[in-house]
Image (cartoon, helix red, strand yellow):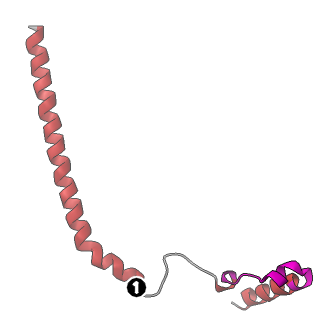
Amino acid sequence: MNLLKEMFVTRIREMLEKQAAIIQRTKDKEMLRRWRQDGPQRNCKHESGELPYDTDPNYLKMPSRAELQNPKMARKWQNKQAQKKALK
């Protein structure tokens, strides 16, 4: 009797695993289909020139070696950056 119960449970488990695999494959195919359909729409959003994050042009300029070596020039550079930032 115990052997029959184990065989029954094993068959049920295998059947459920097969069903889960089939369901997962179906979900994967559907998700891939949606991703392919929505792909062109997603790409158009970033082509407008806007980046998905904010950048400050003042931080894009690197101080030169002379500005870094000379503390006076470094202070001038920092003041210039602060003035640019204040104007915005």
Relative side of 17 to 59, left or right: left
Q: Residue at x 11, y 15 (%)?
A: 5
Residue 17: percent from left, percent from top: 17, 36
Three-letter code, disc 1: Glu
Residue 24 sits inside the magenta stretch: no
Local SS, label 1: loop
Q: Residue at x 9, y 20 (%)?
A: 8
Residue 21: percent from left, percent from top: 18, 43
Q: Nearer the viewer, residue 46 or 61?
A: 61
Relative side of 60 to 65, left or right: left
Q: Quadrant of residue 19?
A: top left
Numbered range of the magenta stretch: 59-73
Q: Residue at x 22, y 55 (%)?
A: 28
Residue 46: percent from left, percent from top: 41, 81
Quadrant occupied by the N terminus: top left
Outermost residue, right side: 72
Q: Quadrant of residue 7?
A: top left
Residue designated by label 1: 47
Q: Is residue 39 above or below residue 75?
A: above
Q: Nearer the viewer, residue 1 or 72?
A: 72
Relative side of 5 to 37, left or right: left
Quadrant occupied by the C terminus: bottom right
| Figure label count | 1
Residue 18: percent from left, percent from top: 14, 38
Outermost residue, front side: 65
Secondary structure mostly taken by the magenta-highlighted segment of the chain = helix
